[in-house]
Amino acid sequence: MIYSRAEIDAAVARLASDITRDYRRKNPLLLGVLKGSFIFLADLVRRLDFPLEVDFVRLSSYARGTQSSGRVRVVQGLRVPVRGRHVLVVEDIVDTGLTLAFLLAYLGRKKPASLKVCALTDKPSRSKTPVPIDYRGLTVPDKFIVGYGIDFDNKYRNLPDICCLED
């Protein structure tokens, strides 16, 4: 195990406090990146006590296996307009940064009032392109992690802890 459910809960509480401080009066759009962010986003929004909206996008850079293909594609696009909105992208993990860089460029072209990133986990050792992480929950080692929404081949999302996938 890399992080226990208690450690994850403490990180989510800290992130919610920081986000509340910055977004309380902005009616932000929290944009979850599917599928991995759904558990994190659900726990996060339950801790936010101000008006907000939620939408999802689904991107893919993994075919099968544990290595990113490096090519990002939109599987499910935006369903609400973001022009003039305060948008907070909610990610489960920032690995190489390629998927997030793609998404930020995509969203930036739609002219939001502001665009920030909240990531539950960050794996800086694998970074291939610099991306801003405005709200960082936990730093993880250069191992393939699963649990708390993060999967391997659509398995292990339901684990309550963040664990390392053993070869």
Image: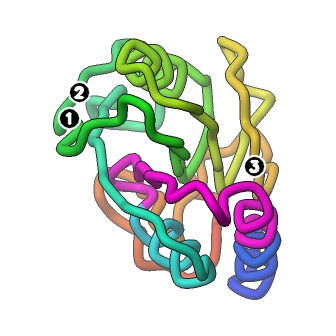
Mark number for residue 133? none
Q: Is residue 147 above or below residue 97?
A: below
The CA distance from mark 2 to mark 1 is 6 Å
Q: Secondary structure at mark 2?
A: strand
Pointer 2: what residue? 74
Could you tell me the amino acid type at mark 1?
Gly
The CA distance from mark 1 to mark 3 is 23 Å
Q: Which residues are magenta?
A: 15-37
Pointer 1: what residue? 77
Most foreground residue, 64 or 61: 61
Which of pointers 2 and 1 indicates the residue nearer the eye? 1
Asked if the residue at tag 3 contacts the one at tag 1, i.e. Cβ–Cβ closer than 8 Å, the answer is no
Residue 123, x across and y down, in percent: 73, 38
Q: Secondary structure at mark 1?
A: loop
Could you tell me the amino acid type at mark 2?
Val
Residue 106 is a magenta residue: no
Residue at 40% across, 47% down: 33
Residue at 41% across, 24% down: 107
Most foreground residue, 14 or 52: 52
**Left or right relative to 29: residue 154:** left
Classed neighbour count for the residue bearing mark 2: other residues with Cα under 10 Å, few (<14), some (14–19), many (≥20)? some
Most foreground residue, 40 or 126: 40
Residue 21 is a magenta residue: yes
Residue 62, quarter of the rendered image: top left
Mark number for residue 135? 3
**Left or right relative to 49: residue 85:** left
The quadrant of the picture occupied by the N terminus is: bottom right
Asked if the residue at tag 1 contacts the one at tag 2, i.e. Cβ–Cβ closer than 8 Å, the answer is yes
Most foreground residue, 81 or 8: 81
